[in-house]
Amino acid sequence: MIVVTSVNGRVGIEAAVEILRAGGTALDAVEAATRLVEDNPDDHTVGYGGYPNLLGQVELDASIMDGRTLQAGAVGALQGFRNPISVARRVMTDLPHVLLVGEGAARFAREIGLQEENLLTPTAEEVYRQGLSNQLPTDKQDWLQDGIQSNLARLTNLAADPEHAAGTVNFIAQDRDGNIACAVSTSGWAWKYPGRLGDSPIIGAGNYADNRYGACGCTGWGELAIRCGTARSVVLYQRLGWGLETACYQAMHDLVVAAPDPANAMMSLIAINREGRPVGMTTVPDKTYVWMTPDLQEPVEEPRLHVELQKVAERGKE
Ligand code: GLY
């Protein structure tokens, strides 16, 4: 039994391990842990308090996958509900679908009785206004007032602010029956174009779990993971017989072709193999991830293996 998470999942990992200790399922563990991160107003990359899109609306994406059955549920661009992971789980269990987006996802959340609320906290709103203003040249500041509606596409390029892009939480758990589940949740790229989905709600891109081989969750520039099918690649490479680290390195190396500037491509992943052994990997130096087993009193924070995509790109040209 094990729970593995990105470092911002620390607030939820002990609750997840407690569920496993008590004989609960991997699905229950990853959902409960993700909810705690979504409820945390100090995490501006996930759930309540997440940074908004260009119009100042908090739009949330999440997915959950059951490695026993390959069932999955996901929501994208969901407004007004702080726990998209629970909506995603109900999509998986209650509907013949995998992914609901926008108003359809909100309608479903209302229908299952979830409480609607404003997710934009005063802190996130202040950073949003300041962030946009800082990105704009002085002669374009009026775009933030009357002009914003007709300048969204141009603002999206200006607002590609790496400080606020691409935070996400990942949880992978394996329970006492050997079942694996993976949950991913995010408010996505801050100041994104309204309706933009990243990799988090896309099964195979930011989330994949299969009891027979392992699981993977991604954080980073979702567009890259979508184009390369990163989470599924990690699992598929293990299916081909490769070891966990080799599978993760290969999935990271695959990003080189899609990354316009490999030196600055941001991608991190956590993964386990079918025996429940964890690894964390990243293109950004000095990043960590966290894991915990039921026999431990507290979580272990470990360095992620570092992949220098620029060097991989240079080697490819030799
Ligand atoms: N990885 C989160 C996102 O790109 O939205």
Image (tube, rainbow, N blue to C red):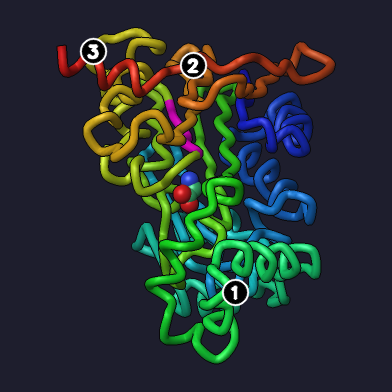
Task: Measure the alpha-carbon separation of dots 1 and 3.
Answer: 43 Å
Locate residue 207, reporting x and y percent.
Answer: 43, 40
Answer left or right for 15 relative to 34: right
Disc 2 marks a residue whose amino acid type is His
Q: Residue at x 34, y 42 (%)?
A: 224
Q: Which of disc 3 and disc 1 is earlier in sequence? A: 1
Q: Going by the picture, which residue comes out furthest to the front?
A: 139
Identify which residue is drawn at 76% across, 20% down: 299
Residue at 78% over, 56% down = 41
Q: Secondary structure at mark 3?
A: helix
Question: x, y percentage for residue 143?
Answer: 52, 81
Tell me the residue that label 1 is attached to: 57
Residue hosting label 3: 315
Does dot 1 land on a helix, a strand or a loop? loop
Magenta-span inclusion, residue 198 = no
- Alpha carbons under labels 3 and 2: distance apart: 16 Å
**Highlighted range, magenta:** 215-219
Location of residue 45 with respect to 138 vertically, above or below:
above
Q: Mark 3 vs mark 2: give the one in front.
A: 3
251, 310: nearer the viewer? 310
Q: Nearer the viewer, residue 140 or 34?
A: 140
Residue 68 seen by the camera: no
Q: Give residue 311's quadrant in the image.
A: top left
Q: Quadrant of the N terminus?
A: top right
Element assignment for label 2 = strand
Residue that sits furthest to the bottom in the current view: 146
Say which mark, if any, is on residue 306: 2
Number of callouts = 3
